[in-house]
Amino acid sequence: MGLSNKELPKLGFLYMDYVLRFFDYSNFKGWPNKIETVTYHWGKDKDRFIQEVKDKKIDVLIGNIPATAYETFREIARELPHVRFIPSLDTQFSNKSKENVTRFAWKYNLPIPKTYIYYNRENGDKFLKKTEYPKIVKKSYGPSNYGGYFVHKVDSYAEAKKLYDKKKYHPMYFQDFVPMEADIRVMLIGHKPVCAFWRRAPEGEWLTNTSQGGSMDYMDVPKNVLDLAVRVSKAANAEYWACDVAYGKDGKVRILECATAFAAFPYIRDWIGQYLMWSLSEGRFRKPHMPMFNWEELGKISPDLLRTMRHITFGKYNASYDGSYFGNKKKMYGEGEYYLHELDSAYKMFDVKERTFEEWPSEKWNYQDRFALKNIKSMKVPALKKEEAPIPSGDEASLAIEISEDQLEILLLSVKGLTEKKLKKILNFYNHEELINILEMDPRALENVKGIKIKMVEKITAVWDEYKTK
Ligand SMILES: Nc1ncnc2c1ncn2[C@@H]1O[C@H](COP(=O)(O)OP(=O)(O)O)[C@@H](O)[C@H]1O
Ligand SMILES: [Mg+2]
């Protein structure tokens, strides 16, 4: 049963310079053939990349595409019609921006906080004058997996206006404020939940991101949350998926974020690899089995240990074997009490198949480039390039901000607490151009420098913002 070595598709990993790799060979343990890698170098690398994929005769290209390369890869995918991208570019539509998440949710009638998107700033401003507060203002596009760094609560028109004058986020993207208990991250493989945890805000705060000091726990994630996550994964036709669900004080669930790119322990990436091996081999490799609520048990293990655990496998439920943990355990769930293996048949792992049409063609859905802010120059803030590596270096960086090395150093030294010594450390880590890109795109990357903490990053960002608006 299943495909022979020769019949198996040729796999390749899609890598990008400067971007963390989600998969490597070790996640596809047991795959008998060579797995190729193709690395995208940014800049004018499209044609070379396409040629390399062709030369290596790759059938399936596996990997996440960051927001800034998304549109380029839609073009690349069109020129490689016989290559299956996993996840597909349509599935990765939500990776590009919050706007895309919203449009995806609107199309499939998935619940989200009420969201407003304005490309016309005058109209946006008019609306902000008459609407109700609080509102949550977000940066739609750019590095966003930094947990609330570009998310702001505004309590009045005056605050909203001040924020937009300063930040110039384009498009204007904001939502009604939803009071919430917590938000819940659900990870799915083949539409089956394989991990889920609560993220609660610290006392008295409204942001629930753990990166801002909130807490995290794996127990009793409610049924309506898992059900919503499954619906979303199916709508996206996602081989693997993560969904952040807001659990409102009103008891309702709403999607906050969803994407194929997310942080996951290695054992979860192993599971995805094993799942893809099963799916791509037409059943030659074993379908992995992840029992429902396994995360409640694995979550008891210290994260430091979990980070090192690999290739976790579970036996299937077997009626005649009464020593099996997941077979004997009952759980209160939704309205009733169930054996976990009963929940396994309610939450099946599906074999996600390739679609043959383009659901989100850029000609229609790339609003950002179609409606770029025309007077962005006069706002002294560079438009995000259509494609800009997260941390480009050397001559790949093309920057719209004019600042000399000396000026930059003087500016940084004007930050309270930023000593010559610290500046030296920063400059040993990042060169001048990288630094400007980081300040623009991803200031928290400064935390990579030893001794630079979030408080310092905030001070630096404030000084930087002020410099730009001068
Ligand atoms: N509409 C909203 N109402 C209330 N809180 C929100 C709303 N949107 C986001 N938040 C809070 O802000 C956090 C970050 O928002 P999110 O959209 O996930 O952006 P990020 O990309 O920064 O993670 C969420 O985890 C949640 O705690
Ligand atoms: Mg988030």
Image (tube, grey):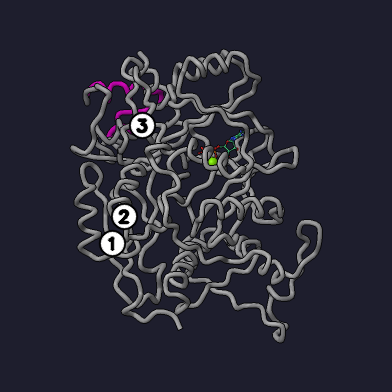
Q: Earlier in the sequence, mark 1 or mark 3?
A: 1
For disc 2, the neighbor class at 10 Å (few under 14, some 14 to 19, many from 20) is many
Q: Is residue 425 visible?
A: yes
Q: Is residue 137 left or right of residue 205?
A: left
Is residue 170 covered in magenta? Answer: no
Is residue 418 covered in magenta? Answer: yes
Residue on which the image places disc 3: 369
Badge 2 element: strand
Circle number at residue 259: none
Badge 3 element: helix
Amino acid carrying label 1: it is Thr
Q: Residue 69: x and y, percent?
A: 33, 43
Residue on which the image places disc 1: 37
> Are circles 2 and 1 on residues that touch, CB within 8 Å?
yes
Residue on which the image places disc 2: 15
Q: Quadrant where the C terminus lies? A: top left
Look at the picture and state if 7 lies above or below 421.
below
Q: Residue 293: x and y, percent?
A: 66, 63
Q: CA distance from mark 2 to mark 1?
A: 7 Å
